[in-house]
Image (cartoon, grey):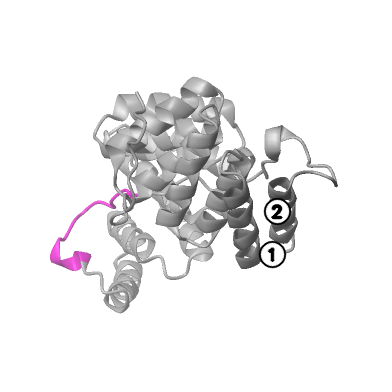
Amino acid sequence: MVKQGAIPKGVIIGVLGIILAGWADFPQLTQPLWAQDQTPAGNSSAAEAELDRGLQLIKQGQVEAAIAAFRQAAQLDATLAPAHYNLGLAYRQQGQLQAAADAFWQAIQADPQLAMAYANLGAALIEGNNLEQATDYLERAIEIQPDLGIAHYNLGLVHRVRGNPEAAIASLQRAIQSNPNAPEPSYHVGLIYLNQGQPGEAEVAFRRALSLQEQYPEAHYNLGVALFNQGQLQAALDSFRQATDLRPTYANAYYSAGLTFIRLQQYEDARTVLDYARTLYLTQNNAPWARPSSKPAAATC
């Protein structure tokens, strides 16, 4: 249950290494929000006029000016939830997580039924590694709007990080049902299956993600890991190659390709690829060579 007054200033502390849903994949998250869901008229109140001006500035790519307009709208009418909400989106676009969280919180105070504000606040809390409160706000968003895919997706990420894979898969599957065109939920389902030692199920999930977004290097890489773990070495190698084609500095993909060449007894190719992977790791200040492994590792995010 969400508690009133539960979000003090300064809740965004640190950054959690997981991937939140891309706004482009959950378009309802970025749609501008008008006062009472209707476009303000020309003779609207001063606050609604500032809200309108801010939205027009966003369309023109003038984010700083839009922030000023949204702030002015909120100052003129503190009960105008869309002013706070769009201010939060603008801050989030700039990477100002604390300011975004504060704005979404104010939107909730102005309109306790605004599901997208709860979902966005939950996402900001995840990025601040405040998982318990993030869960509260995401669950509240779903209670208000059961088909809000972004809330199900981010709740799935929270469950995954907290070590509850069954709940994570259930939430991610609901995200897929709510927004079947978003590849990220399927990708994370694949990671969970991979980490549980179920490479066949993981393969299905990664292939679904790639059917929605072919240029997805992490999905190609982890599909390769799933195939490797099933003994499909040539297919795994093809997936690692596709990952490196999309991201030429993908050290893990080169390293895993090297391990695959070893399994295929193509030792010269293995040496070449592993040497290149080591160069990339050193350049990126990452040294998995201190932890030698005979298997490719699943990505953690």
Q: Position of residue 95 (x, y in %)?
A: 47, 61
* Residue 83 x %, y %: 61, 46
* Distance Cα–Cα, label 1 vs label 2: 16 Å
Magenta part of the protein: which range? 288-301
- Residue at x-position 58% and y-position 38%: 79
Q: Where is residue 145 in the image (x, y as percent from the top left)?
A: 55, 24
Whether residue 289 is in magenta: the answer is yes
- Mark 1 crowdedness (10 Å alpha carbons): few <14, some 14-19, many ≥20: few
| Left or right of 53 on screen, residue 229 | left
Q: Residue 61 carries which label?
A: 1
* Residue 93 belongs to magenta span: no
Q: Where is residue 4 in the image (x, y as percent from the top left)?
A: 37, 31
Mark 2 and mark 1 in contact (Cβ < 8 Å)?
Answer: no
Q: Is residue 266 left or right of residue 21?
A: left
Give the residue at x 34% y 50%: 9
Q: In which quarter of the image is the N terminus?
A: top left
| Relative to 178, residue 64 above or below | below
Label 2: state its secondary structure: helix
In percent of the image, x 70 and y 53: which residue is there? 50
Position of 240 relative to 290 (above/below)? above
- Look at the picture and state if 262 lies above or below 4: below
Q: Can the viewer see residue 200?
A: no
Helix, strand or loop: magenta stretch: loop
Residue to which mark 2 is pinned: 50
